[in-house]
Image: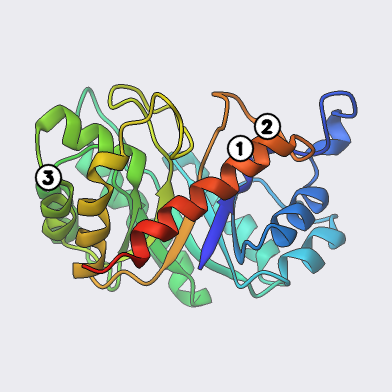
Amino acid sequence: MYGIAAWNIRASDKQEHDRASYRLPLKLRVFRDMGFQAVSLSLYAPYPEEEEEFELLREYDAVTIHISCPAEIEELRQAVRIHRVTGRLRWVSFDAVLGQDCLDYENTVRCLSCAFDLLRKEGIGLLVENWTFEPENFVLIKEKADIPDLGLLIDIGHLNLYVRRMGKKADEYIEALPFDIRELHLHDNDGVRDYHLPLHARHGSILPVMGDVVSGLKKKGFDGTVTLEVIPYGQRVYTKDEEGMASIIRTREIFEDYWNQPT
């Protein structure tokens, strides 16, 4: 199943872009017509008064919400209540809390535990995103957090930064992770900065190791959502930008070609 990150796309075009164009309905229609079955949203959308957004979200198979900092747990409680009317909220993905050049285990585990206590009552799964940490970091999270079925969201761009910096193999990294992988964030970069490029970008660097990425995912039994988190020109594009939207579709096609190759 393929999904798309709504926060990288602006509704309409530059001439028509105003506060109203930030609303989800137009974007949700465009994503649906592009063949996406899932959508990832920031914590603050949709809003309670937007019944049109609820109706459109019901046309998708799954919704993922992303949160990042401890202060957002209360906002998450409100978002879960709002999304209850659609019945489509499947995952909440959590960015690990960063300390001074390292992972803050204490606050990461505390926030995951708070989110889990809320989500398990609603039947919503909890994920943690990989960033560029060693697999051992996630082993420690698993040991410290008593959270059944905690899953992982693998950001392929973050993975690329890690393997380039550390000289590691992508499939070995994936296989060493202690959680089941439920979702991917698909995009590319130059191996140095997290640019969120399409897979066919001139400055991209993930394709030479994409075979290893796919191999590692298949060995882990991945069958979840592949969410495109692409910024085609290094800046958010508009839904009427035909070249930018085609670039997103091309990224999906390239990944699908790699996935369908025999291993």
Crowd tier of the residue under label 2, counting other residues whose Cα lies within 10 Å: few below 14, some 14–19, many 20 or above: many
The amino acid pointed to by label 1 is: Asn
- The percent position of residue 242, horizontal first and vertical second, equals 73, 38
Earlier sequence position, callout 2 versus callout 3 = 3
Q: Is the residue under label 2 in contact with that under label 1 (CB below 8 Å)? A: yes
Give the answer, above or below, for where 28 lies relative to 225.
Answer: above
Q: Is residue 42 visible?
A: no
Residue displayed at 39% across by 36% down: 188
Give the answer, above or below, for where 172 lies relative to 219.
Answer: above
- The percent position of residue 204, horizontal first and vertical second, equals 37, 30
Residue displayed at 44% across by 73% down: 120
Identify the secondary structure beneath mark 2: strand
Identify the secondary structure beneath mark 3: loop
The part of the image, by quadrant, that contains residue 116 is: bottom left
Residue displayed at 44% across by 51% down: 254
The amino acid pointed to by label 3 is: Lys
Crowd tier of the residue under label 3, counting other residues whose Cα lies within 10 Å: few below 14, some 14–19, many 20 or above: some
Crowd tier of the residue under label 1, counting other residues whose Cα lies within 10 Å: few below 14, some 14–19, many 20 or above: some
Q: CA distance from mark 2 to mark 3?
A: 33 Å
Q: Which residue is mark 1?
A: 8
Identify the secondary structure beneath mark 1: helix
Q: CA distance from mark 1 to mark 2?
A: 7 Å
Q: Is residue 104 visible?
A: yes
Instruction: Answer with left or right where residue 190 lies relative to residue 73.
Output: left
Q: Nearer the viewer, residue 80 or 25?
A: 25
Instruction: Answer with left or right where residue 110 lies relative to residue 81.
Output: left
The amino acid pointed to by label 2 is: Val
Q: Which residue is mark 3?
A: 169
Give the answer, above or below, for where 97 lies relative to 224.
Answer: above
- The percent position of residue 213, horizontal first and vertical second, equals 25, 52
Q: Is the residue under label 3 in contact with that under label 2 (CB below 8 Å)? A: no
Q: Which residue is mark 2?
A: 237
